[in-house]
Amino acid sequence: MAGDIPILLARRIPWALLTIFLASILAFSIMYFAPGNPAEIILTQETGNEPTREAVLLFMNGHGLEQPFLKQYAAWMTNLFSGSLGISLRTGDPVLEEFTTRFPATFILAVTAMMLALVVGTSIGVLSAMRPHSPVDLFGNFIASMGTSIPSFWLALLLILIFSIHLDILPSFGYGGIQHLILPTMALGFLQISRILRITRESMLDALSEDYVFEAYAKGLREREVVVKHAFRNASVPVVTQAGLDIGTLLGGTVIIEQIFGWPGIGNFLLTSVMSRDYPVIAGFVLLIALIFVIVNILVDILYVCIDPRMKPGGNIHG
């Protein structure tokens, strides 16, 4: 099994690099051709007045914005290969430095939400599959339906209303101890809970109907052993797939949640950068998300091989 991993990496890494390259072109193109002049927008935000033509031209010349698209993109890629994501048009600071100070808080929130989704979603999903049409199953179906119906920002406001205003037991704003993490994690992870719950239930129902499960029962194994050692191991492959796909979704979805809860992540900075057409920041963020998404998917492929050795490189592996 260990010998299969280098083969898998050799096949995945070239595609990963191509994906990141295409993502960088797409991100830079969208911001470059978007309506609005970054120089005019940023100078207006800084001064509160409409900038003069001379000030706009000076800003554009100072940041290379007067150059055509290909030259700007080539300069950005040159900086990228030298370990830089460029300079923010709005703050004048290195984009990588801006991300380094803000991204850890965003990453903590996204990973915590994913852990909550995996624990709650798989637990309820397994119990629902073991006892179809039971109260637990009905509760699981209710959670799955609500999770796909309720917007995360609406749930965030509801959680603040209940736990911060009426009950006054959890903070609704700021970044500190674990208590500050609870509400944003619940709001961000609820959709993922519903997805993982639904996929776990469906996969477990399929696994529990397989012949090897009945053979395990016939050998006298206890239900817990059959479920954990046999059924869930085979049913976990779709769950791992969904978790890998949701990591990118969670990182992107933190923007609104961070705004609502005053979480000092990358969300507020990114939103302001979008409004300012600060495309070195936007392109850098898209590139970062693409990189994380690619790495997570490679890890998912490795987990496939670990969970089920039959899924070797060259076989029917995700991606």
Image (cartoon, rainbow, N blue to C red):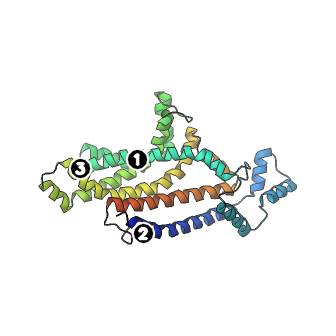
Q: Position of residue 244 (x, y in %)?
A: 44, 56
Q: Residue at x 32, y 46 (%)?
A: 123
Which image quarter: residue 3?
Answer: bottom left
Instruction: Report the front residue among 319 and 136.
Output: 319
Q: Quadrant of the N terminus?
A: bottom left
Q: Label 2: which residue? A: 7
In this image, 228 relative to 62: left or right?
left
Q: Secondary structure at mark 1?
A: helix
Q: Are marks 2 and 1 in contact (CB under 8 Å)?
A: no
**Residue at 82% in and 50% down:** 50
Relative to 211, 277 lies left or right: right
Q: Does label 2 or label 3 sit earlier along the sequence?
A: 2
Q: Which mark is residue 117?
A: 1
- Rounded to the nearest angstrom, the CA distance separating label 2 from label 1 is 31 Å
Q: Residue at x 25, y 53 (%)?
A: 229
Residue 303 placement: quadrant: bottom left
